[in-house]
Image (cartoon, rainbow, N blue to C red):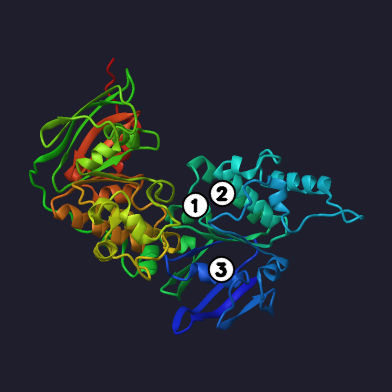
């Protein structure tokens, strides 16, 4: 058994953890929940010796321990798989698993045969088949995840921390990861599972510890709580209070009318309109054509047919840059890979594609004007950071998403397309994003929101276009916007195919 009791952590006058308790039992999957900034990562860094607590004790099998560094924690059986992988991309799986802990023979030479055999044994234990000789940068994200887990298990980890392991996995890959986690639990390994997806907590975990603002709130069995109660403990309010009120139903003029959009010849034809000041939801299963439809509309993907009107005038964009010129912006699904340059500052990210506004003479930039505009945009979307020069990769997921939003607001867009706007964001930050979206539409702008989260779709959309097999099968509004109605249409609705 591993027990953390009364853990406090101060950075100068700032108290990050305020008396946190966490107990891990052999053979359990224990969820650690809390908003970004609640103290989860700090607590895990203390557990694995990266940070030292200001107060509190760590007990392992009843004996008090203090890990001076990560190596001591590993020796005690604590393994961590961080959200950002620690693999060397050009080395293969075997070399990564035994990095800095290589096996040697009697002569002090590398025992490659022993390492290969042990790596293969670990992969069999995880029920994973990968090419051990490939550089890991040629493996899928899921395969790299399993290499990280094997790396921890190679050190005989009794306690394994998985930090957001499902964030970039497909549903099939998540299911396989859960199968591996259940097998490790059966073998007596205790797992700390950190995730923002509450449905995963109920599927895989045994107990839950909740933190809020650095304080311990509760530890409870999964069977003793429901989704609403978890959210209430995490953020201090119920889930139904996370969504801002919808505006009264009213007739609004159309901004964008898509009269015909066919992704491939012979496929279904989609028709929809986006009205002024509304949030139009795009719902459907993964692969149903939601993202492909908006990309084809913007000219980022080829379309067999595309006929649309903007403010009543027929348009067809050759690419997203033309959409940008007409006031249509896209917040992509993967903000880190497609929406941000994470090694750049907040200022640089918000100013991207918009330096013309700050040009003073020829190619010189008015730095004071740029900074003032950036600070105004940050204040508008309530980015929490030390200042505009803070690197984006130091921000939480919610604040990174706010930076993307700030960039487009800085462009003065009329239409924003949000693709999975709150993926990988904690429930508190989600509430802030939702409020920003409603503020944006209240000012007369319009939003297309693509989301796989049904509560988000129901709680935020004024109308919902439901996709299936590459096209829209129905548009629902008012009291018809329910999870049951959307899922029924997404799984059984018929689509119109045209030659």
Determine which quarter of the picture holds residue 138.
top right
Q: What kind of element bears circle 3?
A: helix
On the picture, is 75 further left or further right than 57? right
Q: What kind of element bears circle 2?
A: helix
On the picture, is 254 further left or further right than 333? left
Q: Is residue 117 visible?
A: yes
Q: Earlier in the sequence, mark 2 or mark 3?
A: 3
Quadrant containing the N terminus is bottom right
Whole-angstrom CA distance, mark 2 to mark 1, is 9 Å
Whole-angstrom CA distance, mark 2 to mark 3, is 21 Å
Position in image of residue 362 (x %, y %) = 26, 51
On the picture, is 369 further left or further right than 74? left
Residue under numbered circle 2: 178
Badge 3: few (under 14), some or many (20 or more) residues near its Cα, within 10 Å? Answer: some
Q: Are marks 3 and 1 in contact (CB under 8 Å)?
A: no
* Residue depicted at 68% across the width and 47% down the height: 91
Q: Is residue 228 visible?
A: no
Above or below: residue 182 compared with residue 41: above
Position in image of residue 10 (x %, y %) = 49, 81
Badge 2: few (under 14), some or many (20 or more) residues near its Cα, within 10 Å? Answer: some
Closer to the eye: label 2 or 1? 2
Q: Earlier in the sequence, mark 2 or mark 1?
A: 2
Q: What kind of element bears circle 1?
A: helix
Most foreground residue, 322 or 472? 322
Above or below: residue 23 compared with residue 348: below
Position in image of residue 109 (x %, y %) = 86, 53
Residue under numbered circle 3: 44
Residue under numbered circle 1: 203
Quadrant containing the C terminus is top left
Whole-angstrom CA distance, mark 3 to mark 1, is 23 Å
Q: Are marks 2 and 1 in contact (CB under 8 Å)?
A: yes
């Amino acid at each position: 058994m591993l027990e953390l009791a009364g853990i406090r952590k101060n950075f100068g006058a700032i108290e990050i953890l305020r008396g946190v308790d966490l107990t891990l039992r052999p053979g359990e999957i224990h969820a650690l929940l809390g908003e970004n900034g609640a103290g989860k990562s700090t607590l895990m860094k203390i557990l694995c010796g990266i940070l030292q607590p200001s107060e509190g004790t760590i007990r392992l099998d009843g004996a008090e321990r203090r890990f001076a560094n990560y190596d001591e924690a590993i020796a005690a059986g604590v393994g961590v798989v961080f959200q950002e992988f620690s693999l060397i991309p050009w080395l293969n799986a075997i070399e990564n698993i035994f990095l800095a802990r290589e096996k040697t023979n009697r002569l002090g030479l590398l025992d490659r045969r022993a390492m290969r055999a042990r790596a293969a044994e670990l992969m069999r234990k995880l029920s994973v088949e990968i090419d051990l000789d490939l550089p890991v940068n040629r493996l899928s994200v899921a395969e790299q995840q399993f290499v990280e887990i094997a790396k921890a298990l190679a050190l005989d980890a009794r306690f394994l921390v998985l930090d957001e392991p499902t964030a970039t996995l497909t549903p099939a890959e998540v299911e396989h990861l859960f199968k591996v986690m259940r097998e490790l639990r059966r073998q007596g390994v205790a797992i700390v599972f950190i995730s923002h997806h509450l449905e995963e907590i109920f599927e895989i975990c045994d107990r839950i510890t909740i933190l809020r603002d650095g304080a311990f709130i509760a530890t409870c069995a999964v069977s003793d709580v429901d989704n609403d109660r978890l959210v209430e403990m995490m953020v201090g309010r119920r889930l139904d209070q996370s969504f801002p009120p919808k505006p009264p139903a009213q007739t609004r003029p159309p901004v964008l009318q898509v009269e015909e959009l066919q992704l491939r010849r012979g496929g279904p034809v989609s028709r929809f309109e986006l009205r002024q000041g509304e949030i139009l939801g795009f719902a459907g299963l993964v692969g149903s054509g939601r993202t492909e439809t908006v990309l084809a509309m913007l000219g980022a993907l080829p379309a067999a047919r595309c006929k649309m009107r903007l403010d009543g005038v027929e348009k067809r964009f050759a690419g997203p840059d033309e959409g940008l010129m007409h006031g249509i912006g896209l917040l992509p699904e993967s903000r880190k890979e497609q929406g941000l340059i994470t090694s750049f500052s907040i200022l640089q990210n918000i100013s991207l594609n918009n330096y013309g506004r700050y040009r003073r003479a020829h190619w010189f930039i008015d730095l004071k004007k740029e900074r003032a505009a950036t600070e105004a945009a940050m204040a508008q979307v309530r980015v929490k950071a030390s200042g505009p020069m803070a690197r984006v990769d130091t921000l939480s997921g919610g604040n990174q998403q706010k930076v993307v939003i700030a960039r487009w607001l800085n462009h003065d867009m009329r239409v924003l397309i949000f693709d999975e706007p709150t993926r990988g964001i904690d429930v508190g930050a989600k509430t802030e994003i939702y409020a920003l979206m409603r503020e944006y539409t209240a000012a007369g702008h319009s939003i297309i929101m693509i989301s796989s989260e049904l509560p988000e779709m129901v709680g935020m959309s004024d109308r919902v276009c439901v996709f299936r097999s590459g096209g829209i099968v129905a548009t629902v509004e008012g009291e018809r916007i329910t999870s049951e109605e959307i899922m029924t249409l997404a799984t059984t609705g018929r689509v119109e195919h045209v030659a």
